Amino acid sequence: MSESPTIIEKTRAAVARYFESALQKHRAGEDPFKVVGSYAADMDCALADLFERQFAAGEDISLVAVGGYGRRELCPYSDLDILILRESRAHDAEIQRFVTLLWDCGFDLGHSVRTLAECYEYMVDNPITGATLLENSLVAGSRRLYKRFLSSVVDRYRRKEGSKFAASKIEQIRVSLDTEGRTIYILEPHLKDGVGALRDIQRVLWVENIRNGSIGFEGFSPKSVVSPERVISLREAYVFYLRVRCELHFLTGGRQEILENESVRQVAKNLFYDGDGRRSVEGLMADYFYHARNTYQFLKYYIEASADLPLGQRLKRRFFVNPVGSYLRFYNGKLYLRVEPPAESIAEEVVGFFVEAHRLDCPLSQELREWIRDRLANDKIDFTRSMVINRVLLSILREESGVSKVLRGMRRTGVLSRIIPEFSGLEGLVNFGGHHHYTVDEHTLRTLEKLDSLQREDVTEEGRPFREIFQSLRDPVPLRLALLLHDIGKAFEGNHEVSGSDAAGLICERFGLAEETADTIEFLVYRHLRMFKVSERQDYSEAGVIESFARLVGSEERLKMLYLMT
């Protein structure tokens, strides 16, 4: 029998009120957990009313919220993920009518109909999507059946499949972070599935759920591999992402998950970021990249700490090690801190850690990276006054390959901006007016990666002429340092080529570079767009264009470097 249009209309009206209530709470700046939690509770009321119209009290059937809805996080345009749990293969007709009614009422459903045995089988066979059943909440129907679901499905799965599940989720986090081409430093981040975004954090919560039976951030066990302070930082990031995601849904009127250029100004305005359009956007994106960096570091640490969980491995790493230099030890392909260097030489030694990592072609452990970050945060260590550090950085820039990897590691730990403080202004800096897909600092490091790629054995046929030019340079330092500094002016007001050239001159002076080398670097920073402009905007077949450009460049060595930069 078909439902009365009145029921459908009443339900639609109620859902509209719930949506408006969520919008008002969001616009008032309420905690996003409360916004999405109260919206989920409101949806419970609507669904429970419809469910109870279809199924008599006491029947062996339950309506269970799962996934995001089950953990009480229902964003404005997210699907309603529901499980219709039944004792046996019964109620087919009633279930079909109920689902049809939900569609008629306008709900966007993700639904399944399963018995207890089918739920367990599904979780075992589908470890990726089966995680949705871990997060659940009874909406309506048989509480007795729901309790059996918790004990015979969820708890059983946790006991029997927990270790395998946790390992798979940690591997998914690792793949998310380490897949080539993926980065947190993208101008249009994906709030749900991006690197270190909501989904990666949820995977951590699933692992904690499986290991400790905990739910949410408050449920982290004292036995967890991370400290309470790290959990607080992770929760702050999640709150920020969730707030921005809700705003995107409300603003676009749909399931929009990407913070796109077209919407970012309005998002910043609606989330109360001060200033004109550009300043408010910079404020929003600065917060995004702050939380993204913290989350990335948390996840890296979590992966490493989880892998080291067995006591035997921890003891082996501590006592059976290969010393590296005076302060490091090598274990399982990574460098760990063995002894803390003395305070008076800590800056030089920290930079030396990266030299050792490059020499051994291995990464610093996340534990060591965290130690470096903590020391930089707690100690006012001046890296700019040490000529030893300057010489070390120049020697790194002179290496044949792997330079970008070293600089990326320095950026990740905050060391690079301590050596070159001007670089800190580029970190997380967005430039929507240009042709970049990444933040300015990420774009800068990718140019250096591109240069490094010319030295690889598998360089493409197209890249070989560029490699020959690069290998013919007398000294790679001017080119590499110019690439590192070519957008440094974007951290300052005015023409970025002019301010960048001025900043480059001061940096070269601090590094004690010869006047000719410094002049070349300043020229490359100031003119790094010149060849592009000539080739794209001028007819170089016209008399005088090439001659004028040649006089501007001045030497074949500079021409080679400018060509490679372009």
Image: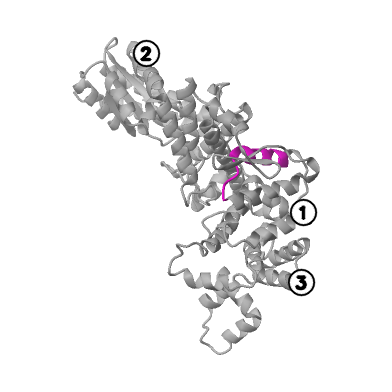
| Chain-order first, disc 3 or disc 1 | 1
Q: Nearer the viewer, residue 116 or 111?
A: 116
Left or right: 460 as drawn, with respect to 387: left
**3 and 2 marks in contact (CB < 8 Å):** no
> Which class describes the residues within 10 Å of circle 1: few (<14), some (14-19), or many (20+)?
some
- Classify 4 as above or below 368: above
Left or right of 196 in this view: 66: left
Residue 431 at least partly seen: no
Q: CA distance from mark 1 to mark 2?
A: 63 Å
Please state if 167 lies on the left or on the right of 346 as rendered: left
Residue of label 3: 515
Question: What predominant SS class does the magenta segment belong to?
Answer: helix
Residue closer to the observer: 505 or 135: 505
Q: Position of residue 213 (x, y in %)?
A: 47, 20
Point out the stretch of residues depicted in magenta. 361-377
Q: Quadrant of the C terminus?
A: bottom right
The amino acid type, in three-letter code, at marker 1 is: Thr
Asked if residue 369 is among those painted magenta in the image, a careful observer would answer yes
Residue type at mark 2: give it. Answer: Lys
Residue 293 drawn in magenta: no
Task: Name the secondary structure under disc 2.
Answer: helix
Location of residue 522 with respect to 17 vertically, above or below: below
Q: State the residue position of label 1.
A: 384
Amino acid found under the numbered disc labelled 3: Glu
The disc at residue 147 is 2
> Gap in Å between the C-alphas at discs 3 and 1?
19 Å
